[in-house]
């Protein structure tokens, strides 16, 4: 229901937006049509009458002169000219200009008014018109109101030593007033007609376009609803071909990610169940031993001699140490897995660390009759990492090596310097690990059958893997049954 409401809201918004765009487009079209049709009329009028002024001079000024020898305007001649012109086109107004652009005479002007003889027309448009033979669309001053521009025809004359210009306004002021009145009505009709057509086409195109444009959106909403209802396998078909490619492909990727996360959560839950079961088993074993021996001591305290009592206490102590070590490993691994440990990386000498670890484990190895060797080249460079975490990783690998190496066996710690990193290897000659089990030994609390009763790898290797991940490194295992096992990882060389 909520998805339908959102979808309907979006469709309404798209429809209104589309309608607004069409209305604006229709208004813009109407204004543009009026503007360009107005210019079209003026340009057509000017092109059609471009030679009118020159034709007038050629016809009327052959025998008569517009200005007599005394410098007076031949008003009778201009009266006849204006009569002939107005008979053809009442919009035409004829003006006589001197070479400086001042109005000398026109029938349409009141020459009794002082300001009339002071009216001056800009000659630049006139000169440009004459130079181009009237081929360009040019607007000139209207002598009745020089702030108004109008289309014109103009020609230069020189008669009996008198020169000037014949300047003909092709659309006079009275004509423009009448035309504007009619044009306003025309524009209103054009605007209403364009608006009506725009609304009609908007309704048709809007419905079709919104339906088409929201097709992929509706499919996306449908897919989301199916996913919400529990159909986790549903995907949008041909998402990369959709108009909403970015959204549809993202939805499919998101669905895949969610499904993978769900599978991962299920897997983690299974591992957690297995982890709890394994931990419970290993915690129960030392606890049972401790509890059993304590009960024996309590029940047979008077019957046991000193040697037996010490043996019982030694067993209790060994089980307690094992229990304490297991709890410490659990605590350490939980912090690593929860990202509560931030590595403090710094340059340090891996050779010194290896020497320290070798000294610490030499006595333990002797007690088990195991030969512990340290092999490394001279001049091992500084490495960059968290020294305490690296030490912990090596100690865990050493504990495993000593645990699985038989009496009389050998454990070798090898440090090799490369160009960009230093290789650290801990190798033993114990029972080895089967190929199918090598990918599993780094999983948390994965128990392996090693041939030794009650011995497993626990969390030690899982902790090592987490430490390597914090150093953006990896650890590899090389092993064959009955040929021993070698664990190798690399640390980057510190470059000053």
Image (cartoon, rainbow, N blue to C red):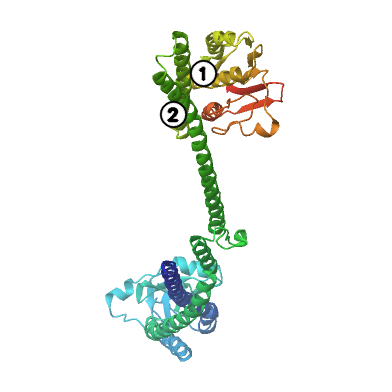
Q: Which one is in front, 278 or 265?
A: 278
Q: Which one is in front, 341 or 305?
A: 305
Q: In this view, does 74 lie above or below 288?
A: below
Q: In this view, does 496 lie above or below 146?
A: above
Quarter occupied by residue 117: bottom left
Question: How many marks can you see?
Answer: 2
Q: Is residue 78 above or below residue 226?
A: below
Which residue reaches farthest front?
303
Where does residue 348 sit, x and y in percent of width and height?
51, 15
Where does residue 217 sit, x and y in percent of width and height?
51, 65
Residue 355: mark in rendering: none
Which residue reaches farthest bottom?
87
Q: In this view, does 164 lie above or below 247?
A: below
Q: Residue at x 52, y 21 (%)?
A: 390
With 377 as the anchor, is 388 left or right in this view? left
Where does residue 79 sit, x and y in percent of width and height?
41, 87
- Regarding residue 159, the answer to whether it shows in the image is no
Q: Which one is in front, 289 or 256?
A: 289
- Disc 2 secondary structure class: helix
With 368 as the anchor, is 265 left or right in this view? left
- Regarding residue 469, the answer to whether it shows in the image is yes
Q: Which one is in front, 425 or 141?
A: 425
- Disc 1 secondary structure class: helix
Contact flag, marks 2 and 1 (Cβ < 8 Å): no
Quarter of the picture containing the N terminus is bottom left
Chain-order first, disc 2 or disc 1: 2
Residue underneath mark 2: 331
Where does residue 69 sit, x and y in percent of width and height?
43, 77
Q: How far apart are marks 2 and 1 (CA)?
A: 17 Å
Residue underneath mark 1: 391
Q: Residue at x 63, y 8 (%)?
A: 378
């Amino acid at each position: 229901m909520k998805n339908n409401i959102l979808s309907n809201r979006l469709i309404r918004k798209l429809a209104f937006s589309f309608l607004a765009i069409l209305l604006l487009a229709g208004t813009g079209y109407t204004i543009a049509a009026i503007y360009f049709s107005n210019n079209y009329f003026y340009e057509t009028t000017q092109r059609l009458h471009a030679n009118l002024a020159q034709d007038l001079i050629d016809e009327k000024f052959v025998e008569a002169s517009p200005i007599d020898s005394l410098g007076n305007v031949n008003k009778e001649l201009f009266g006849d000219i204006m009569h002939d012109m107005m008979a053809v086109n009442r919009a035409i107004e004829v003006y006589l200009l001197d070479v400086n652009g001042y109005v000398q005479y026109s029938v349409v002007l009141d020459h009794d008014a002082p300001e009339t003889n002071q009216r001056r027309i800009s000659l630049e448009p006139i000169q440009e018109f004459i130079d181009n033979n009237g081929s360009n669309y040019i607007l000139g001053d209207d002598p009745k109101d020089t702030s108004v521009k109008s289309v014109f025809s103009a020609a230069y004359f020189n008669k009996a030593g008198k020169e000037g210009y014949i300047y003909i306004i092709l659309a006079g002021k009275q004509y423009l007033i009448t035309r504007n009145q009619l044009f306003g009505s025309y524009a209103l009709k054009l605007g209403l007609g364009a608006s009506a057509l725009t609304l009609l086409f908007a309704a048709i195109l809007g419905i079709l376009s919104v339906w088409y444009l929201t097709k992929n959106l509706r499919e996306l909403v449908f897919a989301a609803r199916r996913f919400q209802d529990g159909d986790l396998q549903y995907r949008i078909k041909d998402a990369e071909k959709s108009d909403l490619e970015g959204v549809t492909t993202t939805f499919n990727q998101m669905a895949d990610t969610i499904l993978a996360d769900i599978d991962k959560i299920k897997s983690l839950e299974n591992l957690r169940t297995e982890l709890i079961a394994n931990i419970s088993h290993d915690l129960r074993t030392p606890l049972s031993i401790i509890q059993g021996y304590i009960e024996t001591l309590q029940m047979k305290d008077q019957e046991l001699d000193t040697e037996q009592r010490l043996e019982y206490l030694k067993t209790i102590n060994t089980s307690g140490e094992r229990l304490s070590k297991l709890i410490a490993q659990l605590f350490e691994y939980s912090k690593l897995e929860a990202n509560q440990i931030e590595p403090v990386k710094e340059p340090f000498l891996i050779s010194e660390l290896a020497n320290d670890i070798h000294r610490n484990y030499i006595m333990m190895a002797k007690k088990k009759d195991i030969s512990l060797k340290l092999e490394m080249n001279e001049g091992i460079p500084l490495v960059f990492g968290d020294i305490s975490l690296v030490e912990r990783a090596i100690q865990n690998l050493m504990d495993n090596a000593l645990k699985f190496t038989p009496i009389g066996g050998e454990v070798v710690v090898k440090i090799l310097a490369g160009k960009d990193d230093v290789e650290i290897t801990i190798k033993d000659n114990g029972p080895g690990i089967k190929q199918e089990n090598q990918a599993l030994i780094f999983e948390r609390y994965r128990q392996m059958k090693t041939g030794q009763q009650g011995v497993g790898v626990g969390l030690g290797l899982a902790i090592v893997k987490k430490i390597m991940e914090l150093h953006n490194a990896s650890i590899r295992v090389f092993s064959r049954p009955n040929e021993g096992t070698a664990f190798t990882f690399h640390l980057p060389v510190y470059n000053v």
